[in-house]
Amino acid sequence: MEKIQVYLVQGPSCSGKTTLSKYLYNKLISIDIPTVLLSTDMYYKTFKDKLTYDKIIGYDFDNPAALNWDALSDTFKAYGTRQREIPISSYSFQTKKQEIFKIDNIYPKVIILEGIYSFNLFSKKFFNIKEFS
């Protein structure tokens, strides 16, 4: 079985990660390479506290603890083990809630992950990376 190539686009806020990732995604699909584009922004945790203006304004979305790493790991593991359905997260900045839903696996040859801490997912202490190159 061919390994899935993973391209990680990491950088500070407003550095062009999303723009570069979308450009790369569009180029790859234009030459018929099955590609998935994921963003760590899709994997923020649901706010547990009662939402107040001060809590929302003061919340540090740039903190790695703000992300649901387990859900992101589950998404990659599902692609890596070629599951038929893939758990994907969606985060609403309006409701401050994360929702997990399933999509059909397109069996990509490439996965692009963009985000301020995208490299963290592939720490050997955090994630088994043998299915990806």
Image (tube, rainbow, N blue to C red):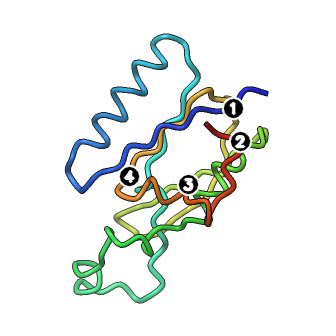
Q: Which residue is mark 3?
A: 122
Q: Nearer the viewer, residue 116 or 45?
A: 116
The residues bearing labels 1 and 2 have C-alpha atoms spaced at a distance of: 6 Å
Comes first in the chain, label 4 or label 2: 4
- 1 and 2 marks in contact (CB < 8 Å): yes
Residue 115, label in figure: 4
Q: CA distance from mark 4 to mark 1?
A: 22 Å
Count residues near mark 1 (Cα–Cα under 10 Å), then give few for <14, some for 14-19, many for 20+. Answer: few
Residue 71 placement, left or right of 40 = right
Q: Is residue 98 above or below residue 109?
A: below
The residues tagged by marks 3 and 4 sit, at their Cα atoms, a distance apart of: 13 Å
Which tag, 1 or 2, sits closer to the chain's start? 1
**Which three-letter amino acid code belongs to the residue tagged 3?**
Phe
> Which callout, 3 or 1, points at the residue further toward the start of the chain?
1
Counting from the top left corner in percent of width and height, residue 67 is at 47, 67
The image shows residue 68 at horizontal and vertical percentages of 53, 67
- According to the picture, the residue beneath numbered tag 1 turns out to be 3
Give amino acid for label 1.
Lys
Amino acid on which the number 4 mark rests in the picture: Gly
SS class, disc 3: helix
